[in-house]
Amino acid sequence: MNRDRVCIEGLTILTTIGVYDWEKSIKQKLVLDIEIAWNNQPAGMSDNVEDCLDYAKVSQSVIDFVENNQFDLIERVAECVAEMILQDYSVPWIRIKVSKPTAVVAARNVAIIIERTNV
Ligand SMILES: Nc1nc2c(c(=O)[nH]1)N=C([C@H](O)[C@@H](O)CO)CN2
């Protein structure tokens, strides 16, 4: 079984995120770490960008999507981003960690992680 991945780490995006009223009118930082199942062998053999999952294109799709939407929970961000990537890039599996590093003053970071498959 091929366990190849394409990874996007530390994708930092400012967006409206949060449960509380005071969070609805400001932008806060989210950091996304994304792992996508993708067979990297064809691109490794051909050296052709057409054969790879273009991490730059995926990154820009995620930035546009998160910046242009408003969310309460980071769980919702993860779910929506996973759904978008699974559909738009026809990939079989994705793992997303969404961090909200400024949410809890006493913590270096808080985050959630989800894994989803294409059905
Ligand atoms: N599991 C979660 N817990 C909390 C979230 C969240 O998105 N997921 N959000 C908040 C508030 O928005 C908080 O970040 C404000 O500081 C609280 N708990």
Image: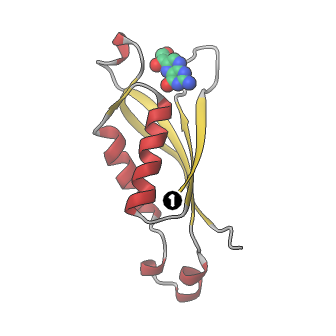
Residue 5 or 13: which is nearer the viewer?
5
Name the residue at 30% across, 36% down: 69
State whether residue 102 appears in this view: no
Tell me the residue that label 1 is attached to.
118
- Under mark 1, the amino acid is Asn
Res 70 quadrant in image: top left
Residue 89: horizontal and vertical position, in percent? 42, 64
State whether residue 38 appears in this view: yes
Residue 25: horizontal and vertical position, in percent? 29, 18
Return the residue found at the far bottom.
46
Return the residue found at the far front.
119
Res 65 quadrant in image: top left
Residue 71 or 52: which is nearer the viewer?
71
Name the residue at 45% across, 58% down: 86
Return the residue found at the far right.
1
Q: Quadrant of the N terminus?
A: bottom right
Name the residue at 32% across, 20% down: 26
Secondary element type, mark 1: loop
Residue 30: horizontal and vertical position, in percent? 47, 34
Residue 28: horizontal and vertical position, in percent? 40, 26
Q: Residues within 10 Å of mark 1 (few under 14, many from 20)?
A: few
Using the image, determine if residue 99 lies above or below residue 37: above
- The number of numbered discs placed on residues in the rendered structure image is 1
Seen in the image, is 58 located left or right of residue 33? left
Using the image, determine if residue 48 lies above or below residue 116: below
